[in-house]
Image: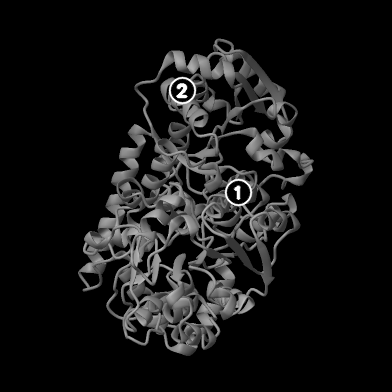
Amino acid sequence: MLIETQNAKRLAIYFFYDRRGVVDGYVPYFLNDLKKNVSEIMIVCNGKLDTTGKEKLEQYGKVLVRENKGFDVWAYKTALETYGWDKLEEFDEVIMLNNTIMGPVYELSETFEKMDQKDLDFWGLTEYFKIKGDPFGYSPYGYLPDHIQSHWIACRRPLVSSKEFHDYWENMSMIEDYAQAVGKHESIFTKTFADMGYKWGVSVEMEDLRNYSGYPLMMCPKKLIKERRCPIFKKRSFFHMESDFLKNTTGEQTSELFDYLRYETNYDVNMIWDTLLPNYHQFDLVKNMNLVYILPTNQYNRELLEEQTKENKVALVMHLFFEDLLEESYHYVASMPQNSDIYLTTDTEKKKEAIEKVFAKLPCNKLEVRVIQNRGRDVSSLLVGVKDVIMQYDIVCFAHDKKTAQVKPGTMGASFAYKCFENTLSNKMYVANVINTFVNNPRMGILSPPEPNHGAFYPTIGFEWGPNFDITRKLARELGIRVPMNAVAPPVAPLGTMFWFRPKALKLLFDKDWDYKDFPPEPNKIDGTLLHAVERVYPFAAQQAGYYPAIGMTDKFAAIEYNNLRFYLRDFNNIVVNQGIGPYHDDMICAVNQVLVQRGSIKAALKFRMKQKLRRILPEKLYKKCAKKWKRMRGFETEE
């Protein structure tokens, strides 16, 4: 069936879900364009919908709020039943789409005009290519056939009016989880009706990519948008499983997508941040978007720095406790721009005199040395000691002199301090580039050095929470932080408590009426205290305020970090691959977890984040036990 674009009567059934019941800006932006191309829109919301959100959606059509059951499949089924077959047959097209896609990058009229000229019974935007085998266990074919992705399926009158279409929906079983949504609907819809003789197609030309990627929209979205004028992209691109990305790409796909949208289209990427930050784990966002900034230590733009530090008030707060480290501390403080303000805190008048003597020669706009109580260490220095002035600034660096209590005095602890300082205050050029990075990335709220991973600190990667998860979560709730936080996804935190930040991004912390008595008295534990909770809550406070956390490194230290991590990974691969396990990372982890599960270590299996792999390696009874606990620990909503 061909469509006459000018006279086409179209119904759009738009499925909406948000765990908070909030309608973020990308939804009305999409619906504004969609409304220009359809006759009616019916919006079906699973679960709750706040009053403001409902008012937003009602501008575009009738809104039906239903129980959060059946995923998008039963939302479509409910909408179809609400209209009834007789009414539905009055439309030339019935489009079923959902809010797992974002856009449009190009006006949807372009897509409709293109597809109206094609003699089809149903069509979509993008295609998922055939997969051998059935990873979900529900396909009647024993494999996943080529299929239109269910985020947009447009069905024309010959199909909608057919008995086969009616039977398909009337006999649709309840969808209990994401696996069933794919296995019982998305992956079989296309083949079901194609086998009956109905013609189908997709608007984005993809056939030549069949051997390039099974899932082009996820694995090479920039290619589809830039080269094939794909009007949409997946919200899931930004929080999808890292293991799946790295099985198919080198990890560039999402940051390439974001940069293309930001710099080469008119799409406002703030709409992406506005929906990602309240809903998804910061660890996933930082990894998928490669939010690691490698900055030069040997070049900067002097004129640009002068301009940026005139437009943005910049300060350094540093806590100094060890008199024998004053000269070393001066070296790093001297990296700050000359027109910045410097606040130094210490715990005695005697130390203050020594500090003022050493720092008297420091070129800066303002130097103030404050004596604070010796309770709370560097944390109270920031949250109490300079609370009265901190919100006057746009960009602030926080640091402290450092002797590491977790290890014996020596090179191991000194190297941890080196890692923190070099990636915070390496030299004037690095600091200038940090300030420039904050100016150029207005949604970045906190920039931290990478976590330690040498010597006794090696297990930090993988155990970033340490014994601090419960106390951090408790603090976060007290502060009103509601962004996702759980024991499986690590914080992107300054584990060393040196970092750059925007004070307005951490306003929740500074708004709390902290007192020195809130912090544990000396001698302090080396872990598991309120100090360690604050250290880990910083990035969540920024995320709650609408800013993302990121990692910052000097160009020189990035080389050290790369070689260290390469050395560790090489050793791991040598052992595991020589045992015949691999070649993929997730296969290796799967095999190791299988051994641990067989030894009765369910907890270890729960830390393995690929649920479908668990389904394949565990007996059904044990899988259900693991999956239930895994879901509770992970605490995240599955999307298409």
Q: Is residue 56 or residue 143 the one in the foreground?
A: 56
**Is residue 386 shown above or below 152?**
above
Q: Is residue 183 left or right of residue 15?
A: left
| Cα–Cα span, label 1 and label 2 | 34 Å
Q: Is residue 113 or residue 564 the one in the foreground?
A: 113
Q: Which dot, 1 or 2, sits closer to the camera?
A: 1
Q: Is residue 111 left or right of residue 364?
A: left
Instruction: Residue under label 2, please give it.
Output: 432
**Is residue 274 shown above or below 188?**
above
Residue type marked 1: Gly
Q: Position of residue 631 (x, y in %)?
A: 55, 72
Res. 375 visible in picture? no
Instruction: Residue under label 1, please give it.
Output: 25
Label 2: state its secondary structure. Answer: helix
Residue type marked 2: Ala
Q: Position of residue 485 (x, y in %)?
A: 60, 58
Res. 165 visible in picture? yes
Q: Is residue 402 left or right of residue 482?
A: left
Residue at horizontal 53%, vertical 44%? 549
Q: Position of residue 158 (x, y in %)?
A: 43, 76
**Is residue 263 shown above or below 22?**
above
Count neighbours of disc 1 (C-alpha within 10 A) and say few if under 14, some if 14 to 19, many if 20 or more: some
